Amino acid sequence: MLTTTLGLLIIALVLLIVFQIAKTNELVTALKGEQEVQNVQNRFHGAMFLGFLIVGMIAAVWSAFHYAPLYLPYPSSEHGAWIRSMFFWTLVATVPVFILTHIALFWFSFQYKRDGSRTAFYFPGSNKLELIWTAIPAVVMILLVYEGLRSWYKITGPAPQEAMVVEATAQQFFWTLRYGGNDNKIGNKSVKLIGGDNSLGLDWEDSANHDDFIADELHLKVGQPVLVKISAIDVLHSFYLPHFRVKMDAVPGIPTQFWFTPTKTTKQMREELNNPDFNYELACAELCGQAHFNMRKVVVVEDEADFNAWKAQQQALYVKLGLNNQTQPSSGGTGSADEQQRNTETEHTKTAKL
Ligand SMILES: [Cu+2]
């Protein structure tokens, strides 16, 4: 309330000041003669234009260098290099045009301000000029769009057969990463099965689910394509791996996916950046609620031996929950109460499904 009142007061004061200046101007004009006052104002505005050009250009160049340490390092994925090159060529085509048009805009406003010493040159137009400044940007745009679409179709095309499959499910406020296990197949799931231990709604009838495991970190094998199947349970999220130039929305009800090939291990990046604490990261790039910042996971890219060693340590969720014992004949009350309860719960889930 106080802020609103203060804001309104400031606006009223600013309006009052503008009004007073205009009134003073009128009086001065009456005293001095209109033309002379106009010339003073034109000189002032011209100088402001020139100042804006110089300060603006210096600030643009300064900020580009000042914030350079915050730029992402060279992409650590195959397709990331294409995106980087597209970005580079877009800048090559647009930055010189931006600089030249802005210099022309502000310099002309300063240099050719009206001072009563010359008359304007009448130029009714030229078809040749129109043709040139329409054709050149059109050709450049066509080339950029062509190259962009070509890369985009390559990036979003079908994943190679040998791609490792990982499922990333987003919800407020964490990611659940599920690996296909030894068969590299992600088992079926259904919203109807969500409940109790089964927060993803996994269908335990589907044997492809029996070796799937949930991982704390996203582990990837260097040089091996990975297909990420992305979904969300509650609201919009976005699967974002900045170092790999991977970003795909996670939409409730609409499965999305993205495949890519990591090209550099975490170890290589640490050496390259001279930073022993460096970690790749997975983030959520869609403001999804109060703890949005919390949706971060560490991504580890490693060679085949390290990856296999890590994978060997992971336990399938099916086994973790003790569901594998349930189908075997009971050996006479050896199961703990906890395990028995779990089994009963699973029976309930099965019944619910039928
Ligand atoms: Cu999110």
Image: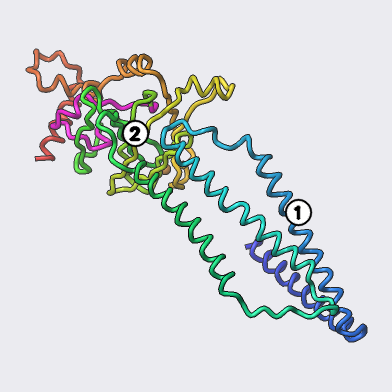
Residue flagged by tag 2: what amino acid is it?
A: Thr
Q: Provide the residue designation for mark 2.
A: 176
Cα distance between the residues tagged 2 and 1? 49 Å
Q: Quadrant of the N terminus?
A: bottom right
Figure quadrant of residue 23: bottom right
342, above or below 56, in the image: above
**What residue lies at 65% left-to-right and 43% top-to-bottom?**
64
> In the current view of this chain or complex, which residue is farthest to the right?
31
**What residue lies at 53% left-to-right and 46% top-to-bottom?**
89
Residue span colored magenta = 198-218
Q: Is residue 58 magenta?
A: no
Q: Residues within 10 Å of mark 2 (few under 14, many from 20)?
A: some
Residue 291 x, y percent position in the rendering: 47, 41
Q: Provide the residue designation for mark 1.
A: 55
117, above or below 299, in the image: below
Residue flagged by tag 1: what amino acid is it?
A: Val
Disc 2 residue lies near ligand 1 with CB under 8 A:
no
Q: Which one is in front, 171 or 91?
A: 91
Q: Which one is in front, 274 or 261?
A: 261
Residue 94 x, y percent position in the rendering: 57, 53
Figure quadrant of residue 9: bottom right
Residue 339 x, y percent position in the rendering: 20, 21
Residue 286 as seen in the image, left or right of residue 40: left
Quarter, ligand 1: top left
Q: Is residue 295 visible?
A: no
Disc 1 residue lies near ligand 1 with CB under 8 A:
no
311, above or below 205, in the image: above
Q: Is residue 209 magenta?
A: yes
Instruction: Tally the marks.
Output: 2
